[in-house]
Image (spheres, grey):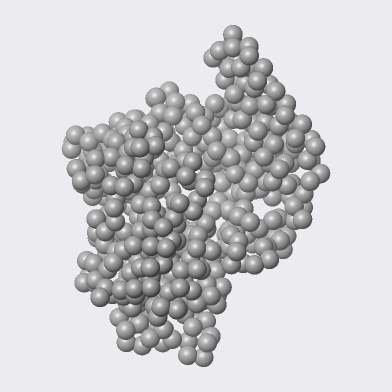
Amino acid sequence: MSDILLSHGYLIGEDAHERKVMKPYPPLGLLSLSAYLKSVGFNVAVCDPTFGTRDALLARIDRREAPVLGLYTNLTTRGSILSLVERAKAAGWIVVLGGPESAGYPDEYMEHGADVIVFGEGELTVAELLPALARHGTDRLHEVAGIAFKDDAGRVVRTEARAKLRDLDALPWPDREAIDTGAYVECWRTHHGTGSLNLITARGCPYRCRWCSHAVFGYHHARRSPTDVAAEVAHILERWSPDQLWYADDVFSISPRWLSSFAGVMQERGLRVPFECITRADRVDESVVDAMRRLGCFRVWLGSESGSQRVLDAMERGVTVEQVREATRAFQNAGIEVGMFLMWGYPGERAEDIEATIEHVKRTAPNVFLTTVAYPMKGTPYFGDVESAIRKADRWADSTDRDNAILGRHSRRYYASATRRLKYEVEREILRRERPGALFARARATLGSLTGRVGMTLRDHEVEV
């Protein structure tokens, strides 16, 4: 019997949106935890249900192949996780949850049957927790830092926080052999012609954007050495042969010096792999662009969020609109595509801020952009700012933080019209610059823009209630 079974609640077969996109990645957090626990002597099993069925996942839980079930929780899997917790408790498991979602709602998850909530990085905590559970059961775990549990009187106890890891090179690489990693590569290759895998070079983000969750790593930032990352890249290429990589860091170019060193190490090893990543516009200079180009970057994602500096300042982004434009130009001039994240509906946003965002995207001309409506996640400063105005779903268990309405804010239909208008105004601008003779296409884009503008006007007085 294993000491612990690690799993999560995401199944691509239950995600209609992702079945259209088909760009899944392996669960690195669970695989990192598995690798560490194995390295210190535990017998670990991993169940990755991403490509499987719920019946198969429940059947595995029913078999109870270990005393402890560890589940990773995130924003989108609340209902799925709760159903797994219920089934696991009926089968006699001790249930341990980790990840940002359960960190925000420890009391609620324990009310629904979870025994222990792990806060922050899981490696050292779970390695101490498993022997403590074997010795004391689930209600005398005071000695284990970084958890919440219920004591023998039924009171929720939260132990002292655990210090963040600093030497990431001391950790083993994620336990990719524990799952069918090749299935992810082939999924990408089948649907996009290019196989892809993910890895991280760092943990955590020191920036303090008010809407961003820091539930796992706090504001601590730690980075692996360039040589360790390059060695992992070489291993991934040799073992699974992906065509490209996704560096899943919060801010890939946070250290231009590290990035330049990494590019040098990769070049020495003869490694140049197409990849994409996320970074911040204020962490981009000539050396960053050059290093990214040498490494093989084909697309970088920037969190532009708004074209209004007033809104960016309210978010405490620490980035200017002009920095986003300069970074976009610099990357595109180097042959690197730019993806842009945009956010509607942040508190205080006015009609003129939406106009500024539309003009900003038209002027900046990213290769692709994605929009979302701001949603407050539990534990963020943004959540605290608007908590009194949040209309929560009737049943916490059947919702997510994305479902919470903010009373008095424009309706989702209003922002859908804004996105439509943005899409077609940008398309029209691109046609004007690059295909001035494409009259029919320009007319179609003009109509789309007009439809979005009219939709915003008609829904200007629609608010969330």
- Farthest bottom residue in view: 153
Quarter of the rendering containing residue 370: top right
- Residue 13 drawn at (x, y percent): 45, 51
Image quadrant for the C terminus?
A: bottom right
Image quadrant for the N terminus?
A: bottom left
Q: Residue at x 34, y 35 (%)?
A: 194
Q: Residue at x 41, y 78 (%)?
A: 91
- Residue 32 drawn at (x, y percent): 31, 59
In front of the other: 317 or 354 = 354
- Residue 220 drawn at (x, y percent): 42, 58
Horizontal placement of 42 versus 110: left or right?
A: left
- Farthest top residue in view: 437
Q: Residue at x 19, y 34 (%)?
A: 270
57 is higher (above) or lower (below) than 186: below
Quarter of the rendering containing residue 254: top left
Horizontal placement of 462 versus 154: left or right?
A: right
